[in-house]
Image (cartoon, grey):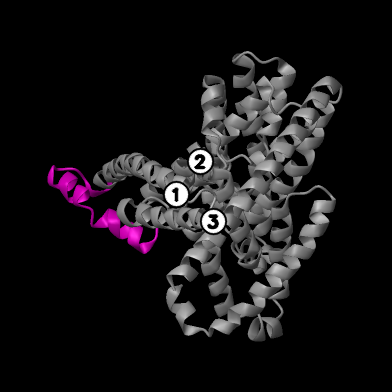
Amino acid sequence: MLNTILAISAYEVLFPVGLILVVSKIFGVFAKRFGLPQILAMLLTGIVIGLFATIPAVNKNFITDGAKEGIAFISELGVVLILFSAGLGTDLKQVKACGLSAFITAMVAVVLCMLLGALVTGAFFGWSNIWSNIFYGVTLTATSVSVTVATLKELGKLNSKIGTTIVSAAIIDDIIGVIILSVILSLSGSGVSEEGSAVLTTSPFVKMFTAMGMQENIASIFTVVLQTILFFVFIIVLAFVAKKTFSHLERKYPHHRRIPIYGIGFAFLVAFFSEKLFGIADITGAFFAGLILAGRSSTEYVERRTSIASYIIFTPVFFANIGISTDWAAFTDPSFLTFAGFGFAFLAMAIIGKLVGAAIPAKLTGNNWKDALCCGAAMCVRAEVCLVSAQKGIDAGLVDDRIKIFLIILIVSSSIIVPLVLKAAYKNDKHDVYKEQIRNQLAEDREAYNSNVMETNVQTNEELENSSAISKN
């Protein structure tokens, strides 16, 4: 892809990127008005522009194949920032407080989704490529926290026992899903970049295991497991160093804009070394970089600044690229009818896996049936991490490009239906809603006050720096 990018003129990318930003914002206004997630607006933007690009004159003069490669390159930066933000937004204290219930709920839901996804893929396409079957299951493991949190907050259930279980399980869900994604990509031998593949094929561990008499494929599996263990050792050591470093920076530059810059730089470096040294997907490195910086005094400030930088250009381009890069001609192929049958069966497994996989453990860990079923329903919501996983599988050749349209259907339908189900289930709990509204208002007032204080401190620090620079001159 890099050779293609170097072969095109940079200005060719400007038209589609500008179109993406303008159209996604316009669609975003309507999405907000109807209470839909913003990523749906970005996905719709990509679909519209992708269909527009199928017109020969448009493809030749405006949205060229080279420009599409440039968009894909920019979207790679977007996916790193998306996973970094997901890590930053992970409340590890809440996960720890919720404990065993959330962990069991998440684990059972993840395993069941992977199993059902793999089984339905094998039933339709056979078992000649076991890694492909498993990866289809991996794409179903992630759960969207944002839609569920907003609904639970409105219903006054966010801080209840079941609300905490749902949010904590969704967080654990994403962590487990991202780890499994990296392991499957590495084991399949096709999911990492050329650099990541080189790490595996030239690894001294492979040579060591083969010298011990192992077959090369078995040696490769042992190498992946060992490199994954070393990756986590690397993350633990890095977390210790980063904690000391960022604590010093937070004391010296409280809520200064250079802290988010260091944070984003840290995410890119961890993402790079994860794939370069360990063959672990770059998005996994970015996610763990966010986890390392989560729960700090500056986390909210870093997350807010990162989101601003990401949502201005990189995130819209990433989600729009999913629609733009879709091969729409494949939908006219007669074989698509068979694939459509698989697609809808795949969606059914996505719902069953989360509904059953989360509801039963929730019931067994002390919740009543209504709360347990609501937990299962809430875990059915999918969003950005689901699409990120699928795109990684498509890039690796493990997942068919046409699955994206069914995942988009899953995201849209779950984002609309699940909040309605939760509202119907808890519509009579007025007292909880009233208490939650008071609690939310106090939290918003506190956040507004802290934000004003932080902005004042930032301005004061910048004025002091400017004054110091002037006095030195």
Q: Pick the residue in front: 11 or 345.
A: 11
- The amino acid marked with disc number 3 is Asn
Residue at the location (51% across, 25% down)?
96
Q: Main secondary structure of the magenta part?
A: helix
Location of residue 444 in the rendering, given as x and y in whole percent from the top left corner: 73, 38
Q: Is residue 126 above or below residue 329?
A: above
Q: Is residue 342 left or right of residue 73?
A: right
Residue 199 magenta-highlighted? yes
What residue is pinned by disc 1? 252
Q: Is residue 153 left or right of residue 246?
A: right
Q: Mark yes or no: residue 61 visible.
A: yes
Q: Is residue 261 above or below residue 156?
A: below
* Element class at badge 1: helix
* Element class at badge 2: loop
The answer to whether marks 2 and 1 mark residues whose Cβ atoms lie closer than 8 Å is: no
Q: Estimate the spatial distance between the alpha carbons at disc 2 and disc 1, rounded to whole Å.
A: 19 Å
- The amino acid marked with disc number 1 is Lys
Residue reaching furthest to the front: 471
The answer to whether marks 3 and 1 mark residues whose Cβ atoms lie closer than 8 Å is: no
Q: Indicate which disc residue 461 carries.
A: 3
Q: Is residue 333 above or below residue 14?
A: above
